[in-house]
Amino acid sequence: MTTSAVHAWERWAVGWHVAFWLLTGLVAIWVGATTHLTGAQRAVGFGLVALLAAAYALLVMRPGDVRCTWRGPAYLTVAIVVVGVGCALDPTMSMLLFIVFSQVWMFSGPVRHGVLFAVALTVSAGLGFLASSGWSREVARDLAPQLGVSLAFSLLLGLWVSRIIDQSRGRAELITELRAAREELARAEQARGALAERERMAREIHDTLAQGFTSVVMLAQAASARLPRDPAGAAQQVGTIEDVARANLAEARALVAALAPADLDGRTVTDAVRRLAERFGRESGTHVEVDAPDAVAHLGRDGEVVLLRAVQEALANVRRHAGAGRVVVRLAPAGDAVRLEVLDDGVGFEPGRTEGFGLAGMRGRVGDVGGDVTVTSAPGGGTRVVVRVPTRPVTAAPAPAEPRARRPVAAHPHSTRPGAAPPLSTDGAST
C-alpha cells in the first residue's frame, strides 16, 4: 500500500461515510414507515439494516485503506447477503443497491474482484426479487433486462473509475519517484558544491598561505645562515620575514572573509602584479621585470583574482624549482582576453610529467572563468607560462585615457647574479 493511496482514501473516506449513513438512515426510515411490511417483516428489515450498519462500522470505518486488506471483501460479502435477503423481503429494499453497487468498486481492490462482486450482487438481488415476486419464467424474463442494464452500467462505471484510480496511482508513484530523484539530485549537487568549495579552498590556501609560509621558511633559513658573518644583513632579512608574515596574515584574513586577495584591495590588477613581482624579487633575490600597461581590459573581480593567483603560483614555482636568475612578467590585452606571460631562465622541466598541485590548481582556477593555461618548458631551457583570461563587457565605457608607454619595471635591479642565467629574448621565448 503506497502512502499516496492511504492519503487518497483518507481524503475521500469522510464523504463515503456520510453518504452511507445517510442512505442507510433513509432505508431504516422506510422500513419503519412503510405499510407493505408485517410486524415480523419489519423486524427482519431493521435487523438487515442493523447488520449492514454494524459490518460497515466494524470493517470499513477503521484507519487504513480497506481495499488492501481482508476487511473490504468481508464487508462486501455481508452487504451482498443483506441486499438479497432485503429484496426477498420487499422489492422496495432494492434501494440498498444504490449503496452497495458503488461500494463494490470502492472496497474490492483489484478489478477482477470488483467484477466478481458486481456479478454476485446482481445475482443476489435477482434471486431476492424472484423470491419476493414468485419463482416463474415470466418474472425472470421481466427482471433480466433491468438487472442486466444495472450490471452493465455498474461494470462500465467501475472499470472507468478503476482505470482512473490506476492512472492516479501511477501518477502518484511517478511524482514520488520524481521527488526522490529531485532530492537525490539536490544531495548530489550539494556534495558537488562542497567538493568544489574544498577544491577552491585548497587552491586558495596553496596559492596564499602555503606560499607565504614557504617564503618565511626560506628567508628564515637564509637569515640563520647569514647571522654569524653578517648580522646587519640577517637583521634586514628578518625585517623581510616580518613583511612577508604581515602580507600572509592579510591574505589569511581575506580568505576567511571570502574577500579578494589583499593585493587587490584598492589597487588595479596591474598594480597588484607589480607589487607581487617587487615582493618576490626582494624575498628571493631574483631579478624580476614587469612589462605591463597601467590599465587592462575589464576582467571583472573573478578574472582579476584568477590572474593574480596565476602570477603568485608562477613566481612560487620559480622560487621553489627553477633556480632562475631572471624572470619576466608580461601583461597585455589579447583580443577578447588578457594575456599573462611569466618567463624564467631556470632549469626547466618536462611539462605533463612533473607538474604538481600548483599548476593543476592554476589550470582549474583559470578554466573556471573560461580561460586557458599553456606551459612551455624543457630541461635546461627555462619555462614559459601563458595564461589567457577572457574579458567581460562593460555597460558604459569610460573616457579613454592618455596612452602611456609600456615600460619594464625592475623589481630588484641590483640582485641579478652576473652570468647566472642566459638572456631572455624580447619576443618572450627563453633561450
Image (cartoon, rainbow, N blue to C red):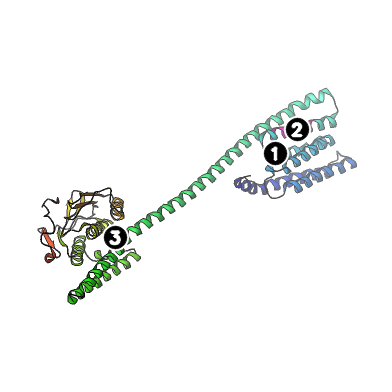
Residue numbers of the magenta segment: 114-126
Front residue of this view, candidates 409 and 394: 409
Rounded to the nearest whole Å, what is the CA distance between mark 3 and mark 2? Answer: 82 Å
Q: Earlier in the sequence, mark 1 or mark 3?
A: 1
Q: Earlier in the sequence, mark 3 or mark 2?
A: 2
On the image, the x and y values in percent for residue 192 come to 41, 52
User: Quadrant of the rendered structure where residue 152 is?
Assistant: top right
Rounded to the nearest whole Å, what is the CA distance between mark 2 and mark 1? Answer: 12 Å
- Give the residue at mark 1: 108
Amino acid type at mark 3: Asp
Front residue of this view, candidates 97 and 201: 201
User: Quadrant of the rendered structure where residue 138 is?
Assistant: top right
Amino acid type at mark 1: Ser
Whether 115 is among the magenta residues is yes
Asked whether the residues under the numbered discs 3 and 2 touch, taking CB atoms below 8 Å apart as contact, a structural biologist would say: no
Question: From the viewer's perspective, is residue 167 above or below residue 267?
Answer: above
On the image, the x and y values in percent for residue 31 come to 82, 43
Instruction: Residue 293: tell me if it is visible.
Output: no
Q: Which mark is residue 120?
A: 2
